[in-house]
Amino acid sequence: MFIRFLIWVARVVIALVGLWVLTVVAIYLYGQRDGARPADAIVVLGAAQYDGRPSPVLRARVDHALLLYEDDVAPRIIFTGGVGAGDTVSEARVAQRYAVRAGVPEEATLVEVAGLRSVESLLAVAELMEEEELETAVLVSDPFHMLRLRVMALRIGLTVYSSPTRTSPISADRRREMRHALRESFILPLALVRPEAEPTTEPRTD
C-alpha cells in the first residue's frame, strides 16, 4: 500500500513539474511573437520611474509604443501605472510626459494612474476604453509579461493584441529575463483561474 502511495505521489510530482516546464516554455514562446495590428489604442504597461524620469524598462516600452504610433497602428496611446511607495508622481504620467516630449500630441494620450498591479491597470483601461468608445488595443510590455497580460485581458473582456518591446534591458540580459519568466510561471496559473488573484503587490520592473 505504501509503495503504491509513493508511486502515486511520484506521478503527481512529475505531472506538476511537466506542467510547470510547459508554462515556462509557453511564456517564452508567446513573448517572441508580435501580433500588432491596427487597433483603437496602444496600451503601455507601467514600470518603475525615478523622480519623474522613466526607468530604462519603462523608456523601452514607451519607445516601442511610439514606433507603433508612428506606424499608424492606433491613434491613441494609453499609459498605465500608479504612484509607487515613496513616489510623488505616477508611472503613467511620467510615460505620458516622455511621449509628449517625443512629439505625440497630448490629446492623443490617456492615462490610468490607479493601478499598481497589472490586473488593476487592465481593469482601469477597460473602463477608460468604454468611456472613450475604444474597442481594440495593442498591449505593450516586456516579452515575459505578454502571455499573462493577454490572458487577463481576455478574462476581463478586452479585445487585445500583443506587441512586446525588444529593446528592454531585461531582454538583453538572459539571466534577468529567465528570472522574470520563472516568476511569471508561478503567477500565470492565478491569472488563468482568477485575474484578480494576482499577488497583492507586484514588484515594479525597473
Image (cartoon, grey):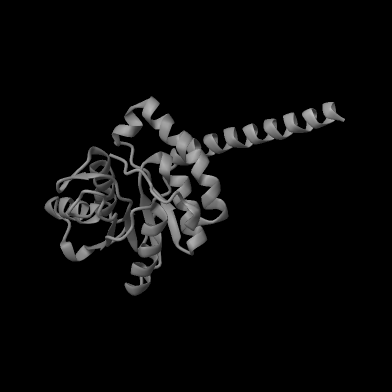
Q: Is residue 189 above or below residue 96?
A: above
Q: How many marks?
A: 0
The picture places residue 48, in percent across and down from the top left corner, at 26, 44
Percent x, y of residue 22: 59, 35
Q: Image check: 200 left or right of 206?
A: right
Q: Residue at x 33, y 57 (%)?
A: 115
Q: Quadrant of residue 133?
A: bottom left
Q: Quadrant of residue 106?
A: bottom left
As drawn, the residue found furthest toward the left would be 101
**Is 62 on the left-hand or right-hand side of 197?**
left
Q: Quadrant of the C terminus?
A: top left
Q: Nearer the viewer, residue 120 or 75?
A: 120
For the question of whether residue 46 can be seen, the reply is yes
Looking at this view, name the residue that lies furthest to the front: 2
Q: Which residue occupies 40% across, 67% down?
A: 135
Residue farthest to the right, as pictured: 1
Residue sitting nearer the eye, 24 or 203: 203
Q: Residue 105 placed where, x, y %?
A: 16, 61
Q: Residue at x 87, y 30 (%)?
A: 1
Residue 114 sits above or below residue 9 on the image: below
At 22% from the left edge and 41% from the top edge, which residue is drawn?
A: 55
Q: Nearer the viewer, residue 200 or 73?
A: 200
Visible in this render: residue 38?
A: no
What percent of the width, then of the height, locates residue 188? Answer: 51, 45
